[in-house]
Amino acid sequence: MGRQKVEKRRKAAGAGSRLSEKKIWLITLLILILLGGSALGLLAVMLRDNTGSLDMPMVWSNADKVYNTSDQTAMQTRYSYTSDLCVSADDVSDSNIVISEGEAAGLFSMDDRKVVYSRDMYKQVYPASITKLLTAILALKSDKMGETVTINWQDLELESGSQVVGFRIGDKVTMQELLRGLLIHSGNDAAQAIARTVGGTQDKFVGMMNEELMALGCTGSHFTNPTGLHSEDHYTTVYDIYLMLNEALKYDEFVSISQIPVYDLQYEDKEGNEMHVTLDSTDHYLTGATEPPKNVTILGGKTGTTAAAGNCLAVVAQNAYGQFYISVVLGAPSKDQLYTDQNVLLSHINGSGA
């Protein structure tokens, strides 16, 4: 009996020992798996670093002036947008490109994702009606594009001399036609009607505008209205305009409308009569008032002019090889100088500078 008890104890001990060995083996395997996962994660980070996506330099200025964000917050925001965008930490000079003093400008290769040239790219300046790029983006993103809008007094509450389509209280206009009035003729009445329809109120729409600016990575901008009419707290940068135009180009309707030189806008007045108004584009390239450089095709964009902002223009252009560029000139002293300096930039997109 004593020997049998001893034998049972030995077998139990052996079984316990084997069970302990299995536990140790399982624990060891789990540790190896965890270590392997960490190693793979580290390798992924190292590979990602080698692509440059985590080592992107800070590419804006005065970020702390916008929404009271810190530089670090603005940097984290910008990292999300650099993979498919033109990026440069500093202005890019070219001795062959000379534009007027006091202007801010940039030339961006959309195919090469390269800043070809820039001057004061991150300087905060007034955008005038180039603001309407963002107004159009929010309209196109909304679920309101199928609606018909009845014009009210708020839509027409504008400073004297404002660029308008010419709507009156009670007119019924589709959002499609308002968008054309906004982009082709830069109508401020169209901008305010769109803002009220999309945002509910203009103040709410302005809040949407600033949220969208941050979502696009436009950390050098702050808007106070949907029109671009002058306000001290309404500003942007050349680089942020590039970001806005780059976003607008994702919408086929924007691309189509921005190439129209003359348009017959239709709507109903308050009595139900069919009304027509002929709208000329504010872009001299589209109307033929200015010729672009040889082998350069202008595909549209947006103009802007106020006393404080000067003459401004952001365009999308295509070179002789089918490559696309965005060119921005802000603060020109006259229309003639604006298009002269735009042509200086665009003359370089075919690679020869001629």
Image: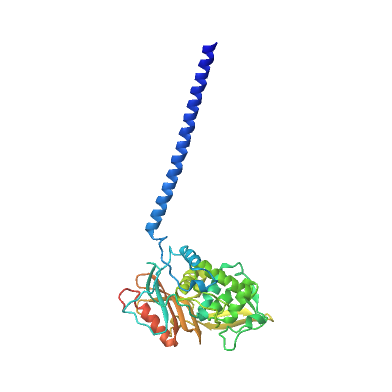
Across and down, in percent, residue 353 comes to: 31, 77
* Residue 170 x/y as whole percent: 68, 81
Image quarter hosting the C terminus: bottom left
Residue 13 screen position, x and y as percent: 50, 22
Residue lying at the far top of the rendered structure: 1
Q: Give the residue drawn at x 39%, y 57%.
A: 49
Q: Nearer the viewer, residue 59 or 217?
A: 59
Residue 118, position in %: x, y? 39, 76
Q: Is residue 82 visible?
A: yes
- The answer, for residue 290, to whether it is visible in the render is no
For the image shown, how many numbered marks are present on the structure? 0
Q: Nearer the viewer, residue 53 or 113?
A: 53
Query: From what the image shows, is residue 258 above or below residue 141?
Result: below
Considering the image in quadrants, where does the N terminus appear?
top right
Left or right: 212, with 341 as reference point: right
Residue in view at x 57 percent, y 81 percent:
188
